[in-house]
Amino acid sequence: MTLKNASQLLDDHQYPTDTERLIASHGDYVIDLPNGTETLEEVFSRTGDETYESSQQAQEAMYNAISHKAIGRRYYSDRDPTTMGTSGPDQVSF
C-alpha cells in the first residue's frame, strides 16, 4: 500500500483512539516505500503511547515516524549552499 492508501485507512478509523488500537487494527498493513517496506506497526511503535483525537493527528504521527526508507538519497540536497571556502559544482544548463 502507498502512504496515500495508509492515510485513507487512518481516515476510516474511529476516533479518538490510541497507538495500541491503531496497531491492533492496522499494524499488519505493509507500506511500500522507495527504499523498502514497513508495516504500520513498525511506524506507530516509534510514536510511543499517544492518543489521537482525529485522523489528521494520526496521519501526522505516521508521517513523522516513517523511517528513512521513505526518502531518496539520505543527506543529499541540491539546494544546500556551497560551504564557505570551497568552490561548488559547475552549473549545468539543461
Image (cartoon, helix red, strand yellow):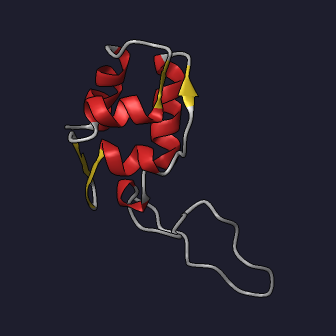
Q: Nearer the viewer, residue 5 or 16?
A: 16
The quadrant of the image that shows the N terminus is top left
User: Which residue appears at 49% of the width and 48% of the height?
Assistant: 65
Q: Nearer the viewer, residue 14 or 67?
A: 14
Q: Determine whether 61 is above or below 84 in the image.
A: above
Q: Position of residue 72 (x, y in %)?
A: 38, 60
User: Which residue appears at 28% of the width and 40% of the height?
Assistant: 27
Q: Determine whether 37 is above or below 59 in the image.
A: below
Q: Position of residue 7 (x, y in %)?
A: 35, 26
Residue 45 located left or right of residue 51: left
The quadrant of the image that shows the C terminus is bottom left
Q: Position of residue 71 (x, y in %)?
A: 40, 56
User: Which residue appears at 43% of the width and 61% of the height?
Assistant: 68
Q: Nearer the viewer, residue 54 or 8?
A: 54
Q: Position of residue 21 (x, y in %)?
A: 38, 29
Q: Nearer the viewer, residue 64 or 89?
A: 64
- Image quadrant assignment for residue 86: bottom right
Residue 12 located left or right of residue 49: left
User: Which residue appears at 31% of the width and 21% of the height?
Assistant: 8
Q: Determine whether 42 is above or below 16 in the image.
A: below
